[in-house]
Amino acid sequence: ADIAALIDHLNFIEGLAGLEVRYSAAAEMPFHRMKVRLKREIVTMGVEDLDPASSAGTYVAPADWNTLISDENTIVIDTRNAYEVSIGTFKGAVDPATASFREFPAWVERHRDQLEGRKVAMFCTGGIRCEKATAYVKSLGFEAVFHLKGGILKYLEQVPAEASLWQGECFVFDERVSVSHGLAEGEAELCRACRHPLTVEDRLSPRYAPGISCPHCHEVRSDEDRARYAERQRQVELAAARGKGPHIGS
């Protein structure tokens, strides 16, 4: 009832009428705290004078996505950052290997020749980044630009696993870490030292120590860093043992 009341309230706010709401469940509270902030942009790409509301690419429904990305004349681009892509992406998708969304325009500029004469299909977690990404690619003169409506999450919600072209899990920005088909919680966990998502295989590495290091950060952290992380992990485990819930440092 409280959630329904909140959604009703949001729908009365100017500009939010008809808000698309997505629901998924978790075994435990997936957020440690709630923050509400006003931001100039939800995701920052660093390109001025783009108007995604009027110039974004063509939406493709999840039910039609497989047909588009299976076309040999389609280049499929994952607009998410490398750490997100590392645990899952669509079959045949190109990974720009970006550390932040600000790097995406430069990547497109370097690979314009690969886009020439082809359909360009882009996707991201929930569809927001693609509003800007497709608008930017269209601003360069490309016309056949498409993006997955509702993003990966809507695809995983609507397309059954047996018909899916998704491989792996989808990173999400909460304590679930990842979800799979049907938006079920995935198996990935987060390295608390570097915040990189870890697969089951990553956690079998001798370089993995819970809360201290993982294969992605072991070589770039100092002994002093690891000692600090070890103390934080000790406090996290103590808090859990005392039944105090998630430690703020976790």
Image (tube, rainbow, N blue to C red):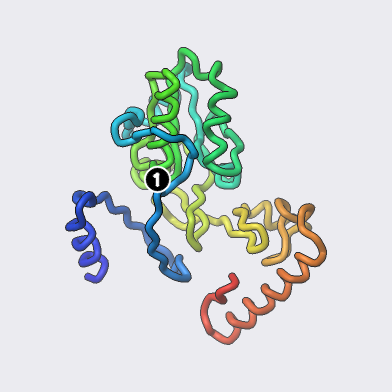
Q: Is residue 217 above or below residue 192?
A: above
Q: Is residue 62 visible?
A: no
Quarter placement of the C terminus: bottom right
Q: Please provide percent x and percent y for residue 57.
A: 35, 28
Q: In this view, does 20 lie above or below 193?
A: above
Q: In this view, does 197 lie above or below 246?
A: above
Residue projecting furthest to the top: 117
Residue projecting furthest to the right: 223
Nearest the viewer among 53 and 179 is 53
Report the side of 79 relative to 56 (left or right).
Answer: right
Q: Please provide percent x and percent y for residue 126.
A: 40, 45
Q: Residue at x 72, y 75 (%)?
A: 231
Q: How many labels does the image show?
A: 1
Q: Please provide percent x and percent y for residue 80.
A: 51, 41
Q: Which residue is drawn at 44% across and 24% down?
A: 120
Q: Mark 1 points at which residue?
A: 126
Asked which secondary structure carries label 1, the reply is loop
Q: Please provide percent x and percent y for residue 144.
A: 38, 20
Report the side of 211 relative to 206 (left or right).
Answer: left
Q: Is residue 199 above or below residue 227?
A: above
Quarter placement of the N terminus: bottom left
The kind of residue tagged 1 is Gly
Quarter of the rendering containing residue 214 = bottom right
Nearest the viewer among 93 and 114 is 114
